[in-house]
Amino acid sequence: MEFIFVLLICPITVIIASIISYYLVKKWFLTPILTFIVFTILTFTRFNETFFFWVIIYTILSIIVSLFFKFTKKN
């Protein structure tokens, strides 16, 4: 179950949250910061320290998606 959570649910959630957050707030850096904070808390409460690797990956994914929408959706 954790395998599905790490490889499917979390990335999809991060992508959707990044898109929605950018359209609502118009700040590309908000979602990566929140992604890092939330997943770091999950690292120490739900998972072990090896999950921190995935925290970095999800934060980078959030940055990429947010910047993609920032530069493609110029308003």
Image (cartoon, rainbow, N blue to C red):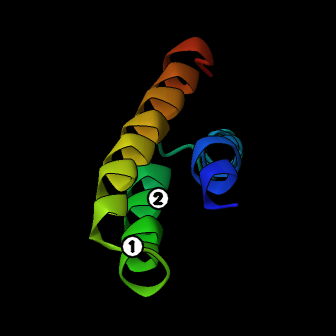
Near-viewer residue (56 or 47): 47
Q: Position of residue 68 (x, y in %)?
A: 51, 20
Label of residue 43 in the image? 1
Residue 21 visible at all: no
The structure residue drawn at horizontal position 30% and vertical position 61%, both measured from the top left corner, is: 50
Give SS at disc 1.
helix
Amino acid type for the residue under numbered disc 1: Thr
The structure residue drawn at horizontal position 66% and vertical position 55%, both measured from the top left corner, is: 5
Near-viewer residue (58 or 69): 58
Which quadrant of the figure has residue 73?
top right
Q: Looking at the image, which residue sits at the far top?
A: 72
Q: Position of residue 58 (x, y in %)?
A: 45, 45
Rate crowding at label 1 as few (under 14), some (14 to 19) or many (20 or more) other CA atoms within 10 Å: some
Rate crowding at label 2 as few (under 14), some (14 to 19) or many (20 or more) other CA atoms within 10 Å: many
Numbered-mark total: 2
Instruction: Indicate which disc, 1 or 2, sits on the residue closer to the N terminus.
Output: 2
Amino acid type for the residue under numbered disc 2: Thr
Near-viewer residue (20 or 15): 15
Label of residue 35 in the image? 2
The structure residue drawn at horizontal position 58% and vertical position 17%, both measured from the top left corner, is: 74
Give the side of residue 45 with respect to residue 53, left or right: right
Tell me if residue 42 comes above or below residue 56 in the rendering.
below
- Between the residue at mark 1 and the residue at mark 2, the CA separation in whole angstroms equals 12 Å
Tell me if residue 47 comes above or below residue 34 in the rendering.
below
Give the side of residue 14 with respect to residue 28, left or right: right
In front: mark 1 or mark 2? 1
The structure residue drawn at horizontal position 36% and vertical position 82%, both measured from the top left corner, is: 44
